[in-house]
Image (spheres, rainbow, N blue to C red):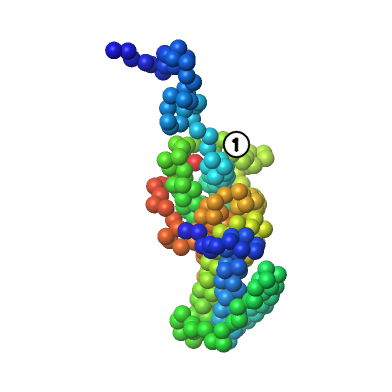
Amino acid sequence: MLLASATTLPLLLAAAGCRSSEAFAGPDPLAGPPRPSPDVITLEAVIAAESNLIHLYKTAISGDSRATAPLLTQHELHLAQLQARLTGVRGVRGGGEPPGARRVPGGRPPGPAQLRAAERVSAADLVRQLAGVEPALAQLFASIAACHATHVAALGG
Amino acid sequence: MAAATGAGPGGSGALPALQAALAAEDAAIFGYGVAGAHLAGVSQAAAEQDWTGHNRARDALAAMISRLGAVPAAAQAFYQLPFAVYDAASARALAAYLEDGVTRAYLGVVAVSDPGLREFGALAMQGSAGRAAYWRGSTQAFPGLPASALLPAGPASRS
C-alpha cells in the first residue's frame, strides 16, 4: 500500500502527469487557504477599530464612570456581534491590547474629549465602509455608527 | 435581516425604502404635534425643533422619490398613538418612540444597493438615534436593528 504524505503527493501527481488542481474536484489543497471575502476583510478592520475604542474606554479617566460604563458595555456588545459574524470564517483574536491601539500623546489616559473624538471618527469610518458590504452587514455597521454618534452627545459633545 | 428588495431606479429596493422613510417622517410630524402640546420650556423648544427637522426630512424624501419617477405617498389624516399621552413624561416617551420608528425606517434605506442612499440612510439614523437618546435619557447599543437581526454571541474578547 502506498501512503502519500503532503510532501510526496505533489511528486506523485507530477509523475502521473497531472496538476494538483486537476486531481481534486474541490478546492486545491496545495493552493493555501482561500482568500477572505471583501466582507471578511472589512469586518476584521471594523473589529480592530471597535477593540481600539474599548481599549480607549478602559484606559480613560473619567470624573463620572457612571456615564462611561454603559457606553463601554455597548461597545462590548458591538464587538460581540461583529465577532459572531466572523465565527466559523476565521479564528477571532483573543484578549490583550489591540495591535495599534491608540495612545494619547504624553502617555496620559484619554479624557472625555478624546473619547468623543474617537467616537466621531469611528462613526464616520463605519459609514465609509457601507458601500462595499452586503446589506445585512451594512445595516449592522449603520446601527453601530448611530450608537457611536449618540455616545458623542452622551459624553458632553 | 435586510430590508427592501426589488430592483429599480436608485438601486435595489430604493423606492420602497424611501417611501417607508417618508411614512415614518409623516408619523413623526403628527406625533410631535401631540407631544409638544404636553411639554413646556426647553423640552417644548426641543420638540418644536425636532418637528421642524422632520418636516424638512419629509420634504427632502418627497423630492428624492419624485426624482425617481414615483409619487410620494401621502400622509395619513390621523395616526393611532401607541399609548396615551397625557403629561410631559408620556410626551417624552412618545417622542423617543417616534424617533425609534424613524431610525428603523432609515435602516431600510441602508440596505439598498445605491452607495449614496446607504450613506444618506446611515446619517439620518444618527440624527434620529441621537434625538431618541435625548428623549429617552439613555443610549441604545443597536439603534434601529430588530432583535432578530442580532446573532447569538458569546462574550466579546476583552481588550
Q: Name the residue rendered at 49%, 41% in the picture.
A: B159
| Place of residue A77 in the rendered image (x, y in percent of width and height, measured from the top left) | 46, 52
Quadrant including the N terminus of chain A: top left
- Pick out the residue farthest to the front: A17
- The reply to whether residue B27 is in sight is yes
The chain to which mark 1 is attached is A
Eyeballing the image, is A22 above or below B37? above
Which residue is more in the foreground, A101 or A40? A40
| Residue in the image at 57% along x and 63% along y | B13
Q: Which residue lies furthest to the left in this view?
A: A1
Residue pictured at 44% horizontal, 14% vertical:
A16
Instruction: Name the image quarter holding residue A6.
Output: top left
Please give left or right for residue A114 compared with residue A19 in the image: right
> Taking A20 as reference, is A146 above or below it?
below
Q: What element carries label 1?
A: loop
Q: Can I make out residue A152 in this image?
A: no
User: Which of the 4 quarters of the picture holds residue B25?
Assistant: bottom right
Question: What residue is drawn where x is 64% and y is 57%?
Answer: B114
- Residue A136 placed where, x, y %? 51, 55
Residue type for callout 1: Gly
Q: Where is residue B74 in the image (x, y as percent from the top left)?
A: 61, 81
Residue A48's x, y, as percent?
Answer: 55, 42
Q: How crowded is mark 1: few (under 14 residues within 10 Å), some or many (20 or more)?
A: few
Q: Quadrant of the C terminus of chain A?
A: bottom right
A121 to A35, vertically: above or below: below
- Residue at mark 1: A100
